[in-house]
Image: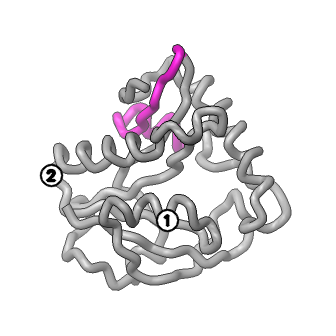
Amino acid sequence: MQIIEAAGDDLTELMEFYRVMGQVLNEKDFLPEGNKGGFPSEEMVSGAIRARQQFIGREDGKIAAAYILNHECEPAYHAAHWQTDAAEGEYVVMHALRVLPRYGGRGYSRRMIEHAIQTAREWNQKAIRLDVLVGNTVPEKIYQSYGFQYVETVEICYQDIGVAMPFRLMELAL
């Protein structure tokens, strides 16, 4: 898998990738009933592409994996008791790390996380922060294997879920 910055001509394929991943997440029991296919939005993805913050993993010429790395976060992040003393702009937030199921078991999530860590270091960031929905244990274990530490659990109401849910905040000091 080759990991690169997404370009403007990747937007349509990326949105289809995230639509398919939304369908996959709809089948998970840790999410409530309803539409969970709207994250990330096309506005968020296109903005991340323009800002050079959307990354894709290509395999066989197709997007197999993707994530966003930027400075945007939910208000709950501002009240959290983070381990790293980092002002806004000194940490990045990882969003929407996804790998298509047919590429599962090949280490693609790990390679995307390694890429994010390297990118954050190149950007001279002090930390990477993220959230994991309570009950979504597989990604949390992968993040922990890279040194991400649990910070605290907060309620976040993401638009695509539509109701407040508990999320575990995690951080990797760089």
Q: Nearer the viewer, mark 1 or mark 2?
A: 1
Pointer 1: what residue?
140
Residue 12 counted in the magenta span: no
In percent of width and height, residue 98 lies at 55, 44
Residue, far top:
61
Going from the N terminus, do you reach mark 1 or mark 2 first? 2
In percent of width and height, residue 96 lies at 53, 49
Q: How many marks?
A: 2
Give residue 114's quadrant in the image: top left
The stretch in magenta equals 44-61
Q: Quadrant of the N terminus?
A: top left
In the displayed structure image, the side of residue 127 where residue 41 appears, left or right: right
- Viewer-nearest residue: 146 or 10: 146
For the point 43% across and 23% down, the residue is 7
In percent of width and height, residue 130 lies at 43, 63
For the point 38% across and 40% down, the residue is 111
Pointer 2: what residue?
124
Image height check: is 81 above or below 15? below
Q: Quadrant of the C terminus?
A: bottom left
- Viewer-nearest residue: 27 or 145: 145
